[in-house]
Image: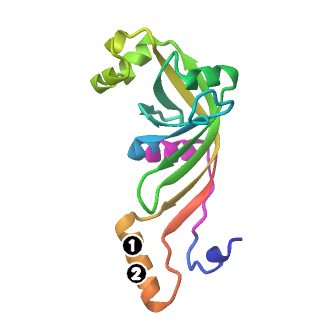
Amino acid sequence: MDSINRNQPEQNRRDLAGIDAAKRVKDMADEAESCFFCTTGATGSTDGVRPMSVRKADDAGNLWFLSASDSHKNHELAANPAAKLYFQVGHHAGFLELEGRAEVMQDRTMIHELWNPLLKTWFTEGEDDPRITVIRFTPRTGYYWDNKHGSVVAGAKVAVGALIGKTLDDSIEGRLTF
């Protein structure tokens, strides 16, 4: 057990599986709205790492993105669908790491569902741009770090703990399995 965890007066670890893991992913992805989307076998100058906007997080824990068919990301996923996602919700809490598989699809119904007019910046022909593809990321495992009661309570606990010299960390962390 980590040394800081030995000083905790309350439980700060909770592994989640199945529906509970999917709910944690959905909640955190909805709040963060974007992530670093990492592929293997990089063909571009970013070494396979790029920021992406999450267009939808579904109840099964799948994350949905829109991407250009001619992007390095799509080419990398065609060669190897393994991907990692990294989220940060706030400055001091709400961190999420996911490993899974990404599937690139041509699904006009899903493109319509995920479309936002601001995306015309990247897809200049609008929602009917033939370059638009859908990526469905299906997580297999992950890890999260968050707080239990929100930033205000977490901050108060840290301040009181510092004042009295006692660990009063409101953190929660754990593995995610799907």
Q: Position of residue 46 (x, y in %)?
A: 56, 36
Name the residue carrying label 2: 159
The residue carrying pointer 1 sits among few (fewer than 14), some (14 to 19) or many (20 or more) residues within 10 Å by Cα, namely some
- Work out whether residue 13 or residue 96 is closer to the camera in this orientation and state it: 96
The residue stretch that appears in magenta: 12-28
Q: Residue at horizontal 64%, vertical 35%?
A: 100
Tell me the chief SS of the magenta region. Answer: helix
Residue drawn 37% across the image and 18% down it: 123
Q: Is residue 86 above or below residue 92?
A: above
Residue 148 locus on image (x, y percent)? 46, 64
Query: Residue flagged by tag 2: what amino acid is it?
Result: Ala
Q: How is the image coloured?
A: rainbow
Query: Residue at position x 51%, y 44% from top?
Result: 25
Q: How many marks?
A: 2
Decide which of 113, 93 is in the foreground and name it: 93
Does 22 lie within the magenta span? yes
Quarter of the image where one finds residue 150? bottom left
Q: Secondary structure at mark 2?
A: helix
Q: Residue at 63% of width from left, 24% of height from top?
A: 77
CB contact under 8 Å: marks 2 and 1: yes
- Left or right, residue 108 beside residue 95: left
Looking at the rendered structure, the kind of residue marked 1 is Gly
Q: Is residue 107 left or right of residue 19?
A: left
Q: Residue 169 in magenta?
A: no
Identify residue for label 1. 155
Secondary structure beneath dot 1 equals: helix
Instruction: Classify the position of the C terminus by image quarter.
Output: top right
Quadrant where the N terminus is found in the figure: bottom right
For the residue pair 142 and 13, the one nearer the viewer reads as 142
State the separation of the CA atoms marked 2 and 1: 6 Å
Point out the residue furthest to the left here.
117
Left or right for 159, reference 50 = left
